Amino acid sequence: MSEEKPLRNRKERKELARRLQSENPGLDVVHPHAAGIDVGNEAHYVAVRPDRDAEPVRRFECFTADLYRLAAWLKKCKVKTIVMQSTGVYWIPLYDIMEEQGFEVCLVNARHTKSLPGRKSDVQESQWLLKLHT
């Protein structure tokens, strides 16, 4: 059994830090076919990956016909899984329709996803959800 020797000097510590930074510290893509939805009381903001559509963030009203339009757009973008956040009950009809249309839907607590400092717009929030879920 070999014991690792402690780093003795600054040069060794800097070399280790450089090696660690050169390795890929990024997150693995788990859900490449994901979408993020910021659920609102008047409108929902939906983000897909930029390679899926020329307009990767769209706004949809909350009427039933609009929710079916949203589902059709997500199918066109080849989305399979959706993450949505809502602070009220406005997610329920959207969740039901998305699940009915065959999407895997995850509802997340807004308190758990708002880890970025500062104020974000609804567009930025949907993009942040997409990034977290992807």
Image (tube, rainbow, N blue to C red):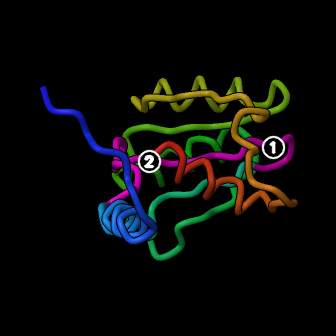
Q: Does residue 10 sit above or below 84 in this rendering?
A: below
Q: Which residue corresponds to the image point at 26% horizontal and 40% vertical from the top-left?
A: 4
The answer to whether residue 105 of the structure is visible from this angle is yes
The span picked out in magenta is 24-43
Badge 2 amino acid: Thr
Percent coordinates x, y for residue 30 in the rendering:
34, 42
Q: Which residue corresponds to the image point at 57% horizontal and 57% vertical from the top-left?
A: 47
Mark 2 or 1: the one toward you: 2
Determine whether the residue tagged by mark 2 lies in a helix, strand or loop. loop
Percent coordinates x, y for residue 95 in the rendering:
61, 27
Q: Which residue corresponds to the image point at 76% horizontal and 35% vertical from the top-left?
A: 110
Q: Is residue 15 magenta?
A: no
Name the foreground residue: 133 vs 56: 133
Q: Which of marks 2 and 1 is nearer the N terminus?
A: 1
Residue 134 is labelled as 2
Q: Does residue 87 sit above or below 79 in this rendering?
A: above
Farthest bottom residue?
A: 54
Residue 131 lies left or right of residue 11; in this view the side is right
The answer to whether residue 51 of the structure is visible from this angle is no
Q: Which residue corresponds to the image point at 46% horizontal and 50% vertical from the top-left?
A: 74
Badge 1 amino acid: Gly
Name the foreground residue: 53 vs 29: 29
**Quadrant of the rendering where the N terminus is positioned:** top left
Determine whether the residue tagged by mark 1 lies in a helix, strand or loop. loop
Residue 6 is labelled as none
Residue matched to label 1: 40
Q: Using the rendered view, name the quadrant where residue 108 is placed.
A: top right
